[in-house]
Image (cartoon, rainbow, N blue to C red):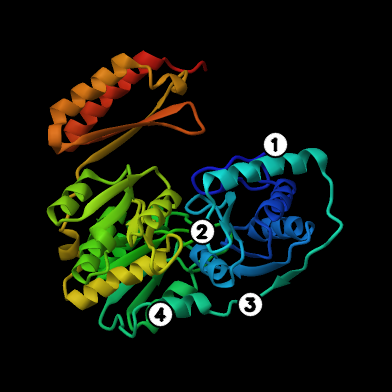
Amino acid sequence: MTLKFGTDGVRGAANVELTPELVRALGRAAARVLRGPFVVGRDTRLSGPMLEGALASGLASEGVDVTLLGVVPTPAVARRSAADGVPGAVISASHNPFVDNGIKFFASGGRKLDDDTEDKLELELERVLNDGALSSTTGTVARQADDDRYGEALVRMLDGRTLDGVHVVVDCANGAASRVAPEVLTALGARVDILNAEPDGTNINDGCGSTHPEDLQKTVVERGADAGLALDGDADRVLAVDHRGELVDGDEIIAICALDMRERGRLEDDTVAVTVMANLGFRQAMERNGVRVVETAVGDRYVLEALEEGGWSLGGEQSGHVIFRDLATTGDGLLTGIQLLDVVVRTGKPLVELASVMTRLPQVLRNVRVADRAALDGAEVFWAEVRAVEDELHTTGRVLVRPSGTEPLVRVMVEAPTVDVAEAAAGRLCGALAAALGTPNP
């Protein structure tokens, strides 16, 4: 068995697909490709300590010194990697249930790996698994108590401003930010109510956090709070909730922050970078307000690559991965939540009013199993149907079709003025796609 990198590292069922033996081999490969020393953090999953030990063993067996940071948010590891100029690793499956786990790496400087480096890691992992040759040197493994540098850095980012007067409910997803999120928001002066901050190893993302914000939405209304923040298990993404209990997603958060930054002269070139999944309503709102939108492939690392190449300040994903390039090297849910609440305080406007800058179009996403996704480009009859739907929608909607990188699937997304129109169009396209490419054998 080997591992393949997805859009955010490698993931699998802990101790089944992601075994300690495989993770140890991955650590050895990472030591050879990324060099060292390394900083390593993890989330609150039951399998975290086991895989932490395996990864540290692999790194150290190649002569690399390892500092274990314990349970910390993914962006805290990225920030430490950037500050110390060393590579880092996070043991987390993000928003997945506790039975899964994963490994994601940061290159020296706190940036996620590019495709070429991931390819090198995969090749080196194959070598490790096949030849098993050991290094003659041994690195050290040291555990370092959390020194609060991450939380202190977040507080400093408001340049002395506070969140005084804001009542916020924060859902920590029983994950990596269960301690630091309430502490930082309280230190900034907010009145904080806490949900799901008692991790037991198995309750991470369990009916809570950014993938299950229903309890947060209900609690914000019941307690009369101004806003809610829903983090995921490793706290690199966030969704918000307004005082009515309505969700404010990543597109809306980016829109709010983009216009605020533009007004303050902090939005470089009046440009934002988002993935192809960003809602058409976001694009329309930015166009109305004179902000240029640059599209990237799905994955926050592609957003960061675009930001760095263009020298731009802000970008992210609908899922709540938001990157403030002047403040961080990766998506940071707590940082994003603080920046959003800062706009609320400075403008004196409730979140619902700020979010009204854009209107989300209904979005329908379907996955179609096909016999050969590689034949998609040549499926002329299907693409003719796509063009027909696009002509009917004209400027009121859009169609996005993309093959899965790992499964025999093609993803079809339709945005339209109403849910019924979007559903009907998606149904037409899925039928045409199945007819053109066939379905896989059972």
Residue underneath mark 2: 111
SS label for mark 2: strand
- Nearer to us of marks 4 and 2 is 2
* Label 4 CA crowd tier, 10 Å (few <14, some 14–19, many 20+): some
Disc 2 versus disc 3: distance between alpha carbons? 23 Å
Mark 3 or 4, closer to the camera: 4
Q: Earlier in the sequence, mark 1 or mark 3?
A: 1
- Residue assigned mark 4: 155
Kindly identify which numbered label has been placed on residue 122.
Answer: none
> What residue sits right under mark 1 in the picture?
1
Is 358 positioned to the left or the right of 178 in the image?
A: left
Residue underneath mark 3: 145
> What distance separates the C-alpha of mark 1 from that of mark 4?
44 Å
Crowd band around label 1 with a 10 angstrom C-alpha radius: few (<14), some (14–19), many (20+) = few
Residue located 23% across and 31% down the image: 423
The residues bearing labels 3 and 4 have C-alpha atoms spaced at a distance of: 20 Å
Three-letter amino acid code at the position of disc 1: Met
Q: Would you place residue 295 above or below residue 224 in this image?
A: above
The answer, for residue 245, to whether it is visible in the render is no
Q: Secondary structure at mark 3?
A: loop
Distance, label 4 to label 2, CA atoms, is: 22 Å
Of labels 2 and 1, the one closer to you: 2
Callout 2, which amino acid?
Answer: Arg
**Residue in view at x 18 percent, y 33 percent:** 420
